[in-house]
Amino acid sequence: MTGRSGRAERAGVTREQILTAAERLFAEHGVSAVSNRQVSEAAGQGNNAAVGYHFGTKTHLVRAIVRRHAEPIERRRGQLADAAGDSADVRDWVACLVRPVTEHLAALGTPTWYARFLAQVVTDPALCAIIIEANRGSASLRRAVEGFDRCLPDLPADVRAERGEMARRLIVHTCADRERALAEGAPTSRPSWHDAATGLIDALVGLWLAPVTRDPAAPPT
């Protein structure tokens, strides 16, 4: 038992080292530009096949990184959704979508790589499905979206889809840009992740509640 426990513990440590190295390299260089061999070397593994042994394909490795961060974000989103209750204020539900991510990044300390990693993954058509899959399984996200839907004005379907995509990109890339600035010691527009989240929530509420203009002179689609 002791031998098996020791091997399992060492394997767990190795997996964590690989996940940390992969997240950093993917964030800094892009997923497609980084090989499994580079990840193994950065993780201090003498065996260049270590990534394949512990995770299989690169897609499995990306999925494992996403899952590594999902639990604390899910837990905090659930707490915020509980606090929002039956709120009819769009801002409360937008906060459920923003603050779990920014609070998680703040808790990780500096530097972090997760926001930049996500920015790389969501712009890769082959990997974006991993994020969609993770979101589909999130009970707290479903609750937040349901609460959000109850508060939204009646928007045309195409406008709603358009603004949803804008909102997702704004959250991901605003967090990634701030994370990059902090890692590089560059100035940031807000002093803390909490304040950055407040500004982001302000912008997203404005986006969702903005009027819809239909140009009568525009050609039909």
Image (cartoon, rainbow, N blue to C red):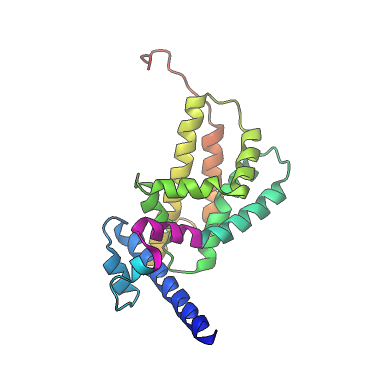
Quadrant housing residue 17:
bottom left
Residue 175 within the segment the image draws in magenta: no
Q: Horizontal placement of 134 versus 62: left or right?
A: right
Return the x and y of residue 139 as percentages of the image width and height: 62, 48
Overall secondary structure of the magenta section: helix
Return the x and y of residue 71 as percentages of the image width and height: 57, 60
Q: Residue furthest bottom?
A: 2
Residue 61 within the segment the image draws in magenta: yes
Which residue corresponds to the image point at 70% horizontal and 47% vertical from the top-left? 84
Q: Is residue 97 above or below residue 183?
A: above
Which residue corresponds to the image point at 46% horizontal and 81% vertical from the top-left? 7
Q: Horizontal placement of 39 versus 213: left or right?
A: left
| Front residue (pair 220, 205) | 220
Q: In which quadrant will I find the C terminus?
A: top left
Which residue corresponds to the image point at 58% horizontal and 61% vertical from the top-left? 72
Residue 112 visible: yes
Which residue corresponds to the image point at 55% horizontal and 26% vertical from the top-left? 155
Return the x and y of residue 16 as percentages of the image width and height: 44, 71
Q: Horizontal placement of 78 versus 53: left or right?
A: right
Quadrant housing residue 85:
top right
| Front residue (pair 73, 204) | 73
Residue 192 visible: no
Q: How many marks?
A: 0
Return the x and y of residue 186 as percentages of the image width and height: 37, 63
Magenta range is 54-68
Q: Is residue 189 above or below residue 202?
A: below
Q: Horizontal placement of 200 versus 92: left or right?
A: left
| Front residue (pair 190, 219) | 219
Q: In which quadrant will I find the N terminus?
A: bottom right
